[in-house]
Image (tube, coloured by chain):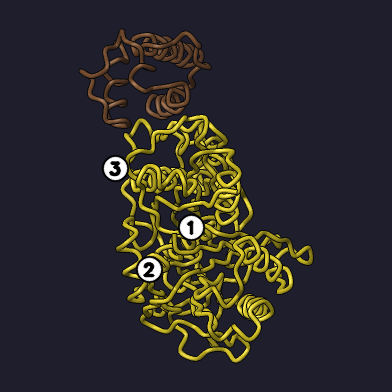
């Protein structure tokens, strides 16, 4: 399941930006989420999902791209947890 | 050198963000001091600002912006607007001179309390030049954007530096002042440990600070920001701007004696410099907004410095320390008190030296008693700011 709706909810909660006001395919920078705001947002994502995000790719600029990164980290975490459970 | 006019005033202070209302509250002797952090081991008193940051920032814009910068942006914006239309200037000829003693105290406190998970924007939030940078970004200022960290004289020094640049024609317009926001438990504890804060039971919080009084016991911390717009008197006239006052003189000296103990000869040097630059004699100055921190030593030293320079004219100089009412804003104190001094001159009204029931015989000054008074003949006034570190700053304003 994509993390996109949860990210949209988090953006709404933190910054008051409605999901409809931020096209997942549009530039986040153009909406005011500049590099500093993004660093802070990644921190909030880590808290919300209980994950560790990689350093942001400088090319990352849309919410859809960000959701894809979160999905990947969540998938890796699930796989690691699954292996640990099997090993135990 | 061009005369320097004060054409805009803005503040976000414990008494509010409307200069006239703040001045009226001071004239009435209304204290903004309240008990804070009641769970600390020792009672603490401070003057805080009721600040609605959503008036100035969207939630997104607040990322990494400490309260000290938020207050600065608001006060500078209010000053800019107050200066009125016709401000259009070459952005490269506009400058920001901002005083700040500590920087983003709340950001540091949060980092310390984060349990190791430190917010990633702590550094840009905390850095002491962040307020000036945020003011510059908000107003599109592309000339010098400078921060002065000179403890309690920070913003007075900043205003003097701005005046010098305007007078020399280096810049056309300057937004000058300062901000401070350090009413957080860790900083309050540190100040308590310094033994300079007024020690009173919580029920006496409002009257805790008693400058020049026999029963004074120190100051109380305050937070806030204040900025002035400075431009040449000629430019102000050309654009038909309201001129509140002329910044006619300023002085800056160093004690070079002790890190925290004030020194009357050092202060006297700054006072003389300000008079000399303005071309005035002591008797020409009708009002002094004193540094007046209500410490046992500081008030006597300031009185002695004034006596040394004013001599026989000391009795004609009306004096008050408004810190009794708004607390000590440290890096923003010089700017707030400069603004109050400008309004005193503008209205020819002197705010009181509150809560001084009995003047200390070692502090004999012609204090303005509660609840303030009219001064119809007032032509010139000074604002004193004397810092830890030994730097003394005096600003001298005259009628425009």
Sooner in the amino-acid sequence: mark 3 or mark 1: 3
Asked if B227 appears above or below B189 in the picture, the reply is above
What residue would you read off at disc 3? Answer: B55
Residue B222 is left or right of residue A10, and the answer is right
Q: Farthest residue toward the right?
A: B257
In depth, the one of B189 and B198 nearer the eye is B198
Q: Chain ID for label 2?
A: B
Q: Chain of mark 1?
A: B
Task: Return the residue nearer the eye: B5 or B34.
Answer: B5
Residue B331 placement: quadrant: bottom right
Query: Considering only order in the chain, which callout, 2 or 3, is on the residue closer to the N terminus?
Result: 2
Quarter placement of the C terminus of chain B = bottom left
Instruction: Label 3: state its secondary structure.
Output: helix
B139 versus A1 height, above or below: below
Question: Where residue A40 sits: x, y (%)?
Answer: 45, 28
Chain of the residue under label 3: B
Per the model, the C-alpha gap separating discs 1 and 2 is: 29 Å
Number of other residues with Cα within 10 Å of mark 1, as a class: few under 14, some 14 to 19, many 20 or more: many
Would residue B272 appear left or right of A62 to someone viewing this image? Answer: right
Which chain gets the yellow colouring? Answer: B
Residue placed under numbered mark 1 in the picture: B246
């Amino acid at each position: 399941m994509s993390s996109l709706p949860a990210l949209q909810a988090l953006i709404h909660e933190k910054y008051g930006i409605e999901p409809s006001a931020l096209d997942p395919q549009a530039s986040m920078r153009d909406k005011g989420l500049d590099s500093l705001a993004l660093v802070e947002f990644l921190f909030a994502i880590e808290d919300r999902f209980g994950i560790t995000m990689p350093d942001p790719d400088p090319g990352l600029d849309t919410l859809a791209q960000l959701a894809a990164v979160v999905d990947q980290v969540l998938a890796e975490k699930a796989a690691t947890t699954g292996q640990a459970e099997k090993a135990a | 050198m061009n005369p320097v006019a004060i054409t805009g005033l803005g503040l976000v202070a414990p008494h509010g963000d409307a200069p006239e209302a703040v001045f009226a509250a001071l004239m009435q002797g209304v204290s903004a001091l309240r008990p804070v952090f009641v769970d600390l081991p020792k009672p603490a008193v401070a003057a805080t600002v009721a600040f609605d940051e959503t008036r100035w920032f969207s939630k997104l814009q607040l990322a990494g912006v400490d309260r000290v910068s938020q207050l600065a942006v608001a006060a500078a914006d209010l000053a800019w607007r107050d200066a009125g239309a016709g401000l259009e200037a070459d952005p490269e000829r506009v400058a920001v001179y901002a005083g700040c003693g500590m920087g983003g105290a709340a950001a540091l406190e949060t980092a310390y309390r984060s349990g190791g998970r430190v917010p990633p924007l702590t550094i840009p939030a905390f850095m002491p030049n962040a307020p000036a940078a945020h003011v510059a970004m908000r107003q599109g200022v592309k000339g010098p954007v400078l921060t002065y960290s000179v403890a309690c004289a920070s913003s007075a020094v900043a205003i003097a530096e701005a005046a010098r640049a305007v007078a020399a024609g280096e810049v056309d317009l300057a937004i000058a002042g300062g901000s401070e926001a350090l009413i957080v438990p860790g900083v309050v504890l540190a100040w308590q440990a310094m033994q300079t804060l007024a020690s009173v039971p919580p029920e006496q919080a409002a009257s805790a600070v008693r400058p020049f009084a026999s029963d004074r016991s120190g100051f109380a911390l305050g937070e806030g920001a204040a900025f002035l717009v400075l431009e040449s008197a000629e430019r102000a006239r050309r654009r038909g701007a309201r001129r509140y006052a002329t910044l006619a003189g300023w002085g800056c000296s160093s004690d070079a004696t002790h890190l925290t103990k004030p020194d009357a000869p050092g202060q006297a040097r700054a006072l003389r410099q300000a008079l000399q630059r303005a071309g005035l004699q002591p008797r020409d100055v009708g009002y002094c907004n004193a540094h007046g921190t209500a410490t046992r030593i500081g008030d006597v030293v300031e009185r002695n410095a004034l006596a040394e320079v004013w001599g026989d004219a000391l009795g004609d100089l009306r004096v008050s320390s408004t810190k009794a009412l708004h607390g000590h804003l440290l890096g923003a104190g010089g700017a707030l008190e400069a603004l109050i001094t400008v309004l005193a001159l503008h209205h020819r009204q002197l705010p009181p030296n509150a809560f001084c029931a009995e003047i200390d015989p070692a502090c004999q000054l012609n204090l303005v008693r509660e609840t303030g008074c009219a001064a119809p003949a007032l032509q010139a006034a000074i604002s004193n700011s004397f810092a830890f570190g030994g730097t003394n700053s005096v600003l001298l304003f005259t009628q425009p």
